[in-house]
Amino acid sequence: MLEPGERVVMISGASRGIGRAIALRLAGEGYRLSLGVRDVARFDARGFAPDATLVHPFDALAPETAAAWVAATADRFGRIDGLVNNAGILAQLDFSSGDEAVLDTVWAVNVKAPFRLIRHALPHLAQAGNGRIINIASTDGKRYRPGVSVAYTMSKHAVMALTQAARFAGWEQGVRATALCPGAVDTDLIAGIPGVTPRQDRIAPDTIAETVAFLLRLPNSSSVAELVMNTRLETLI
Ligand SMILES: NC(=O)c1ccc[n+]([C@@H]2O[C@H](COP(=O)([O-])OP(=O)(O)OC[C@H]3O[C@@H](n4cnc5c(N)ncnc54)[C@H](OP(=O)(O)O)[C@@H]3O)[C@@H](O)[C@H]2O)c1
């Protein structure tokens, strides 16, 4: 298994929810972290060692921030070993309700931004020899469930395709990519959504964080293409 050692991991959307849980977990394990957040000034730095942490602006809707964040990470640490594409949004759109513009925003944040980050980070990940990409997809990337936003479901299916493509892009250089597909996780993203899994049955963000830590420890010879973690009983997922 791989150790944290000198490894540097980038995490998007590290301000709260799953991203923050992943960041705190990896900080505790001794990784050096580059955290992409929309509002650096409001970032709660408790739990992060200043000498092992870069907090940098990253806005999925501002394309130039992706390249700037990757470059700043390489400048600061001299290497990039992992990228966790976590930042994401859930907005309602189905065939009978919702503004079509939702499609564009959800696509921009959930799909285009991870694509862009992979593009910029890939040369660094390839250089590492055991680079890792973990895309936080969803069970909504595996099937359509009635009532869930069609836009969100489409975007998460695209993240599955993105992960497959990333696997081929970096395989020879030791880059391994995983789509992590959780069901309902107890964060703001799903708070107040009608019909969502009851709170007591949701996955804890810390469980996702521990899973990411496990995936980062796996050697090149043990690649997990997708990992589905469901809260409910469904056929196959
Ligand atoms: N919660 C679930 O049930 C669940 C299940 C499966 C998959 N997921 C996926 O897990 C990921 C994290 O979700 P979460 O539950 O932790 O959601 P969350 O609590 O709502 O947090 C979302 C994170 O994404 C960031 N973000 C939103 N828009 C952004 C933008 N334009 N640019 C950069 N960052 C942006 C937020 O930053 P700010 O603080 O600046 O808003 C925040 O850090 C998402 O990809 C989501 O689709 C969640």
Image (cartoon, rainbow, N blue to C red):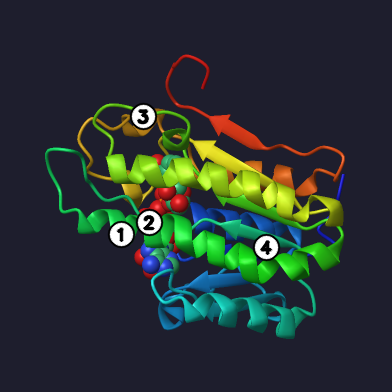
Between circles 3 and 4, the one closer to the viewer is: 3
State the residue position of label 4. Answer: 27
Label 4, label 1: how far apart the Cα atoms are: 34 Å
Provide residue 210's location: percent of width, then percent of height.
64, 44
Q: Is residue 162 left or right of residue 195?
A: right
Badge 1 residue CB within 8 Å of ligand 1? no
Between circles 1 and 3, the one closer to the viewer is: 1
- Sooner in the amino-acid sequence: mark 3 or mark 4: 4
Please name the amino acid that badge 2 sits on. Answer: Trp
Label 3 with label 2: CB-CB less than 8 Å: no
- Sooner in the amino-acid sequence: mark 3 or mark 2: 2
Please name the amino acid that badge 1 sits on. Answer: Asp
The N terminus, quarter of image? top right
Label 1, label 2: how far apart the Cα atoms are: 5 Å
Label 4, label 2: how far apart the Cα atoms are: 30 Å
Residue appearing at x 51%, y 22% in the figure: 237
Label 1 with label 2: CB-CB less than 8 Å: yes
Label 3 with label 4: CB-CB less than 8 Å: no
Label 2's element? Answer: helix
Label 1, label 3: how far apart the Cα atoms are: 19 Å
State the residue position of label 1. Answer: 104
Label 1's element? Answer: helix
